[in-house]
Image (cartoon, grey):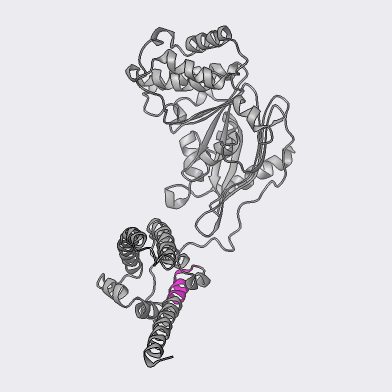
Amino acid sequence: MDGNSIQLNLSAIYSDTGMIVRYLMLSIGYFGIFRKCGVKKRWAFVPIVREYYISLCSDMEREGRTYSIMAAIYYALVFLLKFITDYPRLVLFLMIPVVGLLVAMTIYSVRIYLGLIKVFGRSKKWIWMFLLFDEFTALIWGYSDKFVPQKKVVSLKGVEGAKELGHDMAAIEDGLTVNIRERTVLDFFKKKTLLKDIHMSIPKGHMVLLLGGSGAGKTTYLNALTGYEKANATINLYKNDVYKDYNKMKYEIGFVPQQDLMRGTDTVFMTLADAALMRLPVTMSIMERENRIAYVLDQFGLTAVQNNLVEKLSGGQRKRLSIAIEFITNPDLFILDEPDSGLDGVVARNLFEKLREIADEGKIVVVITHTPDRVIDLFDDVIVLAKDARRTGRLAYYGPVKEAYEFFGKDSMEDILLSINQKDEGGEGRADEFVEKYVSLSENVG
């Protein structure tokens, strides 16, 4: 080995050693910052993950998520470049996204560090220290008593959620039985429980209001109910298992989302006919299908406008059509997410009266609405979901509307909602109290 080779090897060793030292210095600095902010310190030594956790300290979680995703792609491309050095065109092609990601990561790191500076109550001039000497700056901020965060990351470690019922309910023959034991997701390096311990039976012919604040799990509950996003649960509709017999049971469940996906250039009849062709059994004759379309058009008051274009319909007519599309299969369980969105009081009232008629036909109708008090007299029962101390969606009440007022000691659904919302959301923060009260009530009934 000649002298030039030895010199090159020594340069490479020094370069690698320098990178390792800088990595350790930054990790140790982050370790101290994490300790002060109240996040798990061990993540300070894990690349990509630690950038997400520093964003938690900075109160910039959204930016941290984006940065971590970009960083993962960036490092994957850099790693790939090491193996394609013999293909200069490919290297040049990949360098374009690499440079773009590097610029974007720099912008997001500036946002995250500015957030950290704000949380620690320091001057924005510190951003230059973070950008130019991040490892030294992190060490100073992590271990100097002069640098103290004005607020810490809220930790749920050691926090116990509200009391649980802890066992399934027996499936009823004439209705819907819901036993959601748990619904969890992996949310950026950590397990998050969205729903837990939700058990109820809804008899056929009932129209039910689904009530809950932001983040209480209403949409997650509906997705678990329909089998769209399966939970650790057993959902029985007339004793048929929705999850096990999903291919069959999905036709027994109608779900109307808040936003419709109808083509404005189709007529009302064409829209409903397409839905019938796709959703009704292939064994159904043309005559039977046409009779079903005619019946649904009449049921939802759309016969007079069946030849009108969808884009020419009024808001109320368009909403009725979106409901008719899902009702074409004559489902036993009918779920609607804010069907009155954008409708005035009179039109919304007429729509809910139509839903009441559907329930009276022996169907189960579950509805989310942000203005429940103006139509609450049309509902039989109310489901109240609330976030407990661990920020998990729990069942705070299920039962008759009239008894709900007494249970919560309130005179309106809006006041009930305020009582279970967290204090930082403008509520009374009594979710755990009512969750445990309902569990105790269920145990006594059981």
As for residue 161 lying within the magenta part, the answer is: no
Find the magenta span and give its range: 30-39
> Which quarter of the rendering shows the N terminus?
bottom left
As for residue 36 lying within the magenta part, the answer is: yes
Q: Is residue 356 above or below residue 372?
A: above
- Total count of labels: 0
Can the viewer see residue 17 in this picture? yes
Residue 240 in the image: state x and y as whole percent. Answer: 70, 29
Residue 239 in the image: state x and y as whole percent. Answer: 72, 29
> Which quarter of the rendering shows the C terminus?
top right
Give the residue displayed 53% in from the left and 22% down from the top: 278
Q: Is residue 198 above or below residue 282?
A: below
Q: Is residue 159 above or below residue 432?
A: below
Residue 237 in the image: state x and y as whole percent. Answer: 67, 29
Side (left or right) of 335 relative to 85 = right
Can the viewer see residue 152 in this picture? no
Give the residue displayed 28% in from the left and 71% down from the top: 127
